[in-house]
Amino acid sequence: MSSTGKKGAESKIVVLGNAGVGKSALVVRFLTRRFIWEYDPTLECTYKHHTTVDDEAVTMEILDTAGPQYTIHREGHVRWGDGFVLVYGINDRHSFEEIQNIKQYLDDIKKTNLMCVLIGNKSDLCHERKVSYVEGQNLATDMACAFYEISASDGGEEISELFHELHREIKRRKQMEAKPRRRSSAHQVRNMFHILFKSPNGKQPFSPSSPTGKQQFLVPP
Ligand SMILES: Nc1nc2c(ncn2[C@@H]2O[C@H](COP(=O)(O)OP(=O)(O)OP(=O)(O)O)[C@@H](O)[C@H]2O)c(=O)[nH]1
């Protein structure tokens, strides 16, 4: 809740990628601004994070996944998520190639324009680089999403920025999806007026504007 008592926007974010690419390190870096070298690789965690984005109090739920990518269990995660952080290691070609399969898997389940961001992690390991920056950029262009090369170990502003940007995208999408519903409820109110103020002879006694230019509602006897 914000200081005005208004509930802020919420987003559910799922972090996916091959084992060892640094998903946990990335999430922990975002949440705590710290880097921890080793995590339990089998650990799967959901974090509830209260923060501020564009002066609005927001809640992000972040699911740090582990284990095989394509399981029934994982399908539940995909349905749960509003947006996805897809991570590969710049020093791990296989993890980069796997991103397209993960994206396809997500598309098959979500069946809508997927909201995601592509991350090339471990940019500090330049000397071990197996995926160029341009390759990452091109893949992100194909997937119509933002691309960041980052280092969870070094930190940097981009790590907060990527989560915030994804949150903004999710919020925009939710607002767009809510619009038709709002329009249809306005339509319902209009219909209600129509029924309420319909005269017994079937003629419409509701006058949108009086001769004086002021709006009037004529209540039937
Ligand atoms: N040099 C370097 N090492 C990193 C970076 N991010 C993570 N690591 C290391 O990479 C290893 C794997 O990191 P995790 O965060 O456990 O990777 P994960 O993707 O969560 O792995 P799973 O839980 O097995 O799926 C650890 O030894 C981390 O310390 C980074 O940016 N730079």
Image (tube, rainbow, N blue to C red):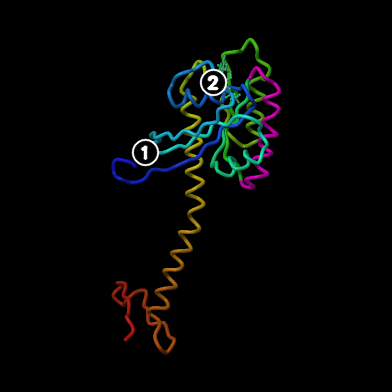
Queried whether the magenta region covers residue 56, the answer comes back as no
Q: Amino acid at mark 1?
A: Ala
Q: Which residue is mark 2?
A: 39
Q: Earlier in the sequence, mark 1 or mark 2?
A: 2
Q: Position of residue 131 (x, y in %)?
A: 67, 20
Query: Left of 22 or right of it: where is 6?
Result: left
Q: Amino acid at mark 2?
A: Tyr
Query: Left of 209 or right of it: where is 80?
Result: right
Span colored in magenta: 90-112
Residue name at image x 68 percent, y 17 percent: 130
Split into quadrants, the picture shows ligand 1 in the one at: top right
Determine whether the beta carbon of the residue marked 2 sits less than 8 angstroms from the nearest atom of ligand 1.
Answer: yes
Where is 32 relative to 215, above or below? above
Residue name at image x 47 percent, y 33 percent: 47
Mark 2 surroundings: few (<14), some (14-19) or many (≥20) residues within 10 A: few
Q: Position of residue 127 (x, y in %)?
A: 63, 10
Q: Which residue is mark 1?
A: 57
Q: Position of residue 68 (x, y in %)?
A: 66, 31
